[in-house]
Image (cartoon, rainbow, N blue to C red):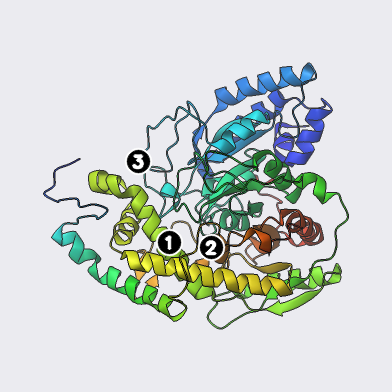
Amino acid sequence: MIDNGETARGGALALTEARREELAPKLAALLADLAKLEELDRPELEPATPWPWREDDDDGR
Amino acid sequence: MTADDLCAMTLSEAARLIERRDVSPVALTEAAPDRIARCEPQLNAFITVMADDALAAARTAEAEIARGDYRGPLHGVPISLKDLLLTRGVRTTAGSRILANSVPDRDATVVRRLRDAGAVFIGKNNLLEFAYGEVHPDYGPSRNPWNTDYGTSGSSSGSGAAVAAGLGFASIGSDTGGSIRGPAAYCGIVGLKPTYGLVSRAGAFPLSWSCDHIGPMTRSVRDCALVLDAIAGYDLGDPTSLRRTLPSYAASLDRPAERPTIGIVLPEDGDGVTSDVRRVIDEAAAVVQHLGFPIVPVKLPHPEQAARALLVLIYAEASAIHLSWLRERADDYAPNTRERLELGAQLPATLYLQASRVRGVIVGAHRELFRRVDLLLLPVSPSPQYLVDAPEPEPVGDEGDRIKGGLRFTGPFNLTGQPAITVPCGATPQGLPIGVQLVARPLAEPILLHVAAELERAMTDRLPGREGNPLVV
């Protein structure tokens, strides 16, 4: 790993301050749009699996 | 028959001639690199051309066939592979600088199955970097054979260009939000995203595990069925692989089929569909009705939310896949790929789980829709063209991710896992192809292919003219 003064923490990506500032408005715009997912979210549901359509729903024709 | 005549055949035609021993795999394979050499400077469809390996494989195939060991329709047929499928002993770059010199010691499952079927690999196709952000400048963009000022869409960009140009009889692409269907539609060929789990993802460099699909890109629906026959089936190497007894997809094309009900997706405000695409959808709808299919007008459930949910899953999963390279080799990514990956690493885990729940809602809505219809007919992309040398926009604008609109018609089926195919059905006034998409229930590829083949036959005379263009076959 290149030592660039950043500390990688489990699962997280450390960015330099300059890069963080550069991305901040884009991240804000992205999150603002993605927040609209809440309109369709149903918290009582569990997250869907990669095979979300139950097999007995298909008729395989 | 000239070398270009050989290259211009469909896979089905080439297979028939090989089986009858009217054409030799060596003759077919020798014709391919010659044509690649002539077309490639304008198309940039390949990252690696495997001329020597292909010729050796063709000679082996020819000897096997001569002694009566014919393996089936792919035996001795030259095809290409998107360069994110691992190929033993042949570099697999994923369109990246990071893997520029990576030579795998194993084949992807789909590659092994094609090898077992006797296919001859002529090369590895260009693509968007890691099938994601943009073309890496080390490789440059593929260009559309119908007009090289225009792009091929992505991410299986080289695959689309190669098949349309007769540089091999098929290619294998990957599709996480439309990356098979988009390039197929832009290049005037057939592209199938099979049911999730039908074709193994093992050995395909992932973009988003839960949304990635591997599938064929070909010059006809029948060719698509032939390739699917070779690559579909359970694989222990892919934890999401389906354990099912599968039909012969090519054989099912020859059986009489019922007339399934087709839902025609209606225009909506803000769908971004151009008048050219809308015209072709309307014409295709009229044609299927004329062919005797019952049609009903329908609305696509939650298309914008589906695009958002898909984007979250891709952002998060892709960033998790690339985390260590992001830390160590961030400068080696193309700027937009890096930006997407860095943004994805900043999304909260709760958003990923929320998108996964919304995925369930969207699946439920499509399940409801498919109680009323058997198939959907809809656009692939809202727009059929873009100039390939136009400046690449940054991934995120004021309204969020810029590709969201482009996912409207393809992305939902990466969430639901349903099979979807694109068939060339028309052209823009500039002579660029326009594809139409058909979607079926999970594992209903036989009826999907059947209807696609009927549509293909009925729309043949509406395709753009090839006259005077040496780059298309």
Image quadrant in which the C terminus of chain B is located:
top right
**Quarter of the image with the N terminus of chain B in it:** top right
Q: Chain of mark 2?
A: B
Q: Is residue B75 above or below residue B11?
A: above
* Quadrant assignment, res B31: top right
- Give the image quarter of residue B436: bottom right
Residue depicted at x 62% and y 58%: B185
Image coordinates of residue B96 in percent, x first then y, are 38, 43
Please give the name of the residue rendered at 81% of the width and 49% of the height, measured from the top-left corner.
Answer: B252
Say whether disc 1 or disc 3 marks the residue closer to the N-terminus: 3
**Discs 1, 3: same chain:** yes
Mark 2 crowdedness (10 Å alpha carbons): few <14, some 14-19, many ≥20 = many
- Tell me, yes or no, whether dots 3 and 2 are on the same chain: yes
Amino acid at dot 1: Leu
Q: Find disc 1 in the rendering and name its residue.
A: B313
Q: Is residue B445 left or right of residue B185?
A: right
Q: In which image quadrant can residue B183 be found? A: bottom right
Q: Residues within 10 Å of mark 3 (few under 14, many from 20)?
A: some
Tell me the distance, in whole angstroms, between the alpha carbons under discs 1 and 3: 25 Å
Chain letter behind tag 3: B
Q: Position of residue B133 (x, y in %)?
A: 40, 55
Pointers 1 and 2 in contact (C-beta within 8 Å): yes
Between tags 1 and 3, which lies in front?
A: 1
